[in-house]
Image (cartoon, rainbow, N blue to C red):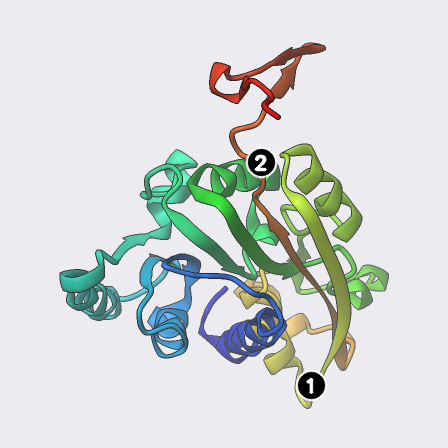
Amino acid sequence: MTQPIRWLQDEIAYRMLQKLDIVKLDVKDILVIPDFSGKHFSAFAKRLPSACIHSIAEDGLSGLQLKIAKTIANWRSIFRGGRVSPMTNYLSTGKFDVPDNSVDLVFSDLLLQDLVDPKSFLQECRRVLREGGLIAFSYLGPDTGKELRSLQTTPFQLKNLLSPWDMHDIGDALMGERFSDPVMDMEYLTLDYETPELLLADLEALKLVTLNPQLESEMTVLPQKITLEVVYGHAWVLGKGLSKSQDSVTYIDVNQIGRKTR
């Protein structure tokens, strides 16, 4: 996603933070992925001033923007150890630059729809979350841009979201990755447009189309609105050290075996 829909990224993050108001969580360390121009980093710095914030910055940040974000993180790190790393590192390695069992909250705003395999993302989140930690996320569901499907000819190439998972798919994946008490909900947002140019700019930013400048003069009749399916979810990491099953065999850590006393 890029600058034309910065307002959407900020609005969804605001709604996510409202949902977290009712969650009781002792947060010492946070991982924000992605951090859009450092704005989410700043929001958490104000909301949880004593927390250490690890920030994975979105792709496309200018060198100056990334430097500012790193400066803020390094200033806080004098006391709390915060850090900033680019999203390209995660996308190339599939790993966060964060140690195991090191954060209490993973906050992910509008990312999962751009990942080929959300399950590996959930696995990585579980790796870095401490016992009792929380993952909170939002993403665009498969009904996003459904108005475009009826178009016969277009000056652009329609694209599907990389992850077509609906909220039930993600809920099942959370359970499959041994997260506890997942809560999922969804809402539809409708965006209305006065001009086709504004619509196309947002569609490209949402990665729903690839524009062909040579065909833009052949503009077809476009819808004046698009629907966004916004899915929200959160789940806990509980019983992280408990037994686990593999190939129908259950493995139990020796430290879990205790003697019952009266």
Q: CA distance from mark 2 to mark 1?
A: 48 Å
In the rendered image, the vertical position of residue 107 relative to residue 247, given as above or below: below
Question: What amino acid type is highlighted by mark number 2?
Answer: Gly
Secondary structure type for disc 1: loop
Asked if labels 1 and 2 touch by Cβ distance under 8 angstroms, the answer is no
Identify which residue, 240 or 247, lies in the foreground. Answer: 240
Where residue 54 sits in the image (x, y, percent)? 33, 56
- Residue at image location 36% in from the left, 45% down from the top: 102
Badge 2 crowding class, 10 Å Cα cut-off, few under 14, some 14 to 19, many 20 or more, is few
Where residue 11 sits in the image (x, y, percent)? 57, 79
Q: Answer whether residue 208 is visible to the viewer in this image.
A: no
Where residue 202 sits in the image (x, y, percent)? 59, 73
Secondary structure type for disc 2: loop
Question: What amino acid type is highlighted by mark number 1?
Answer: Tyr
Residue assigned mark 1: 193
Identify which residue, 75 or 70, lies in the foreground. Answer: 75
- Residue at image location 58% in from the left, 58% down from the top: 137
- Give left or right: position of 38 versus 69: right
Residue assigned mark 2: 239
Q: Quadrant of residue 232?
A: bottom right
Mark 2 or mark 1: which is in front? Answer: 2
Q: Answer whether residue 213 is visible to the viewer in this image.
A: yes
In the rendered image, the vertical position of residue 112 relative to residue 37, given as above or below: above
Q: Quadrant of residue 45?
A: bottom left
Q: Which residue is situated farthest in the bottom direction here?
A: 194
Identify which residue, 166 or 29, lies in the foreground. Answer: 29
